[in-house]
Image (cartoon, helix red, strand yellow):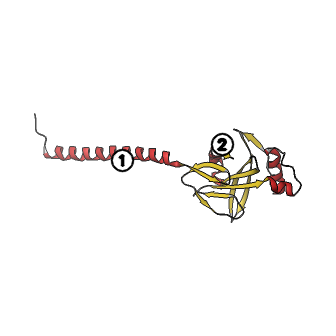
Amino acid sequence: MKKLSRPMQIGLIVLSTVLSFSVFFVLSSGLSNLFILKAKTKEFTKAGMTISLTSDFYEKEIASQTAYYESQKYIVTVLKEEFTIFESIGLSTDISVKEYAELVIENNMIDSAIEEKDNLTFFKYEKTVNGKQFSYFATVHKSSDAFWLIQFACETKNAEDSQDLFIEWGQTIKLN
């Protein structure tokens, strides 16, 4: 067997080192992505409602909402309106989620149409908050004791890319 020259030996060592680090990097990236995917889903439960979001979300207390979840890019607000509220002002609770959505739109003077898709009833609207334009994907639900308004929001520039994600999260909502 012929002995390799010194420059050839150095070249092979450098090449094998580069290949080893490349393989290590690719494998470790792939494994970390697997762990990220497994850790991404996180369930949040509050007042008889459970929703699956990602582990990027954390819960904050907001006085006007039953629950409030926030990540760097998204906001989720949850409002539970118990039937006793409706009864105290003389409104029937024997209405559909679509009729409840109509009441929400009318009472908040929102310009939107109600849609039903992928087992969700929702409406969309935009609003400027603190100088930033936000898009809202508002879902409506009915449980045995309340109507629920669960809204997903992001900056309007990200809204088109986020709708499928909002639908996915909306489909995870479970009510007692």
Toward the viewer: 72 or 151? 151
Pointers 2 and 1 in contact (CB under 8 A)? no
Of 110 and 122, nearer the camera is 122
As drawn, the label of residue 109 is: none
Q: Earlier in the sequence, mark 2 or mark 1?
A: 1
Residue at 64% over, 63% down: 61
Dividing the picture into quadrants, the one containing residue 121 is top right
Q: Is residue 74 left or right of residue 84?
A: left
Amino acid under label 1? Answer: Phe
Residue visible at 77% across and 54% down in the picture:
82
- Mark 2: amino acid: Gln
Q: Residue furthest right?
A: 90
| SS for callout 1 | helix
Residue ranking furthest to the top: 1
Tell me the element at label 2: loop
Q: Percent from the top left, x then y, of residue 47?
A: 68, 54
Q: Quick check: 170 left or right of 81?
A: left
Seen in the picture, residue 80 relative to 113 is either above or below; the reply is: below
Q: Quadrant of residue 170?
A: top right
Q: Which residue is mark 2?
A: 171
| Quadrant position of the N terminus in the picture | top left
Q: Position of residue 22 (x, y in %)?
A: 33, 45
Which residue is nearer to you in this view: 37 or 164? 37
The answer to whether residue 172 shows anywhere in this view is yes
Whether residue 109 is visible, yes or no, is: no
Q: Nearer the viewer, mark 2 or mark 1?
A: 2
Q: Residue at x 74, y 51 (%)?
A: 148
Indicate the position of residue 104 as horizontal and vertical percent values: 80, 53
Q: Which residue is mark 1?
A: 25
Q: CA distance from mark 2 to mark 1?
A: 36 Å
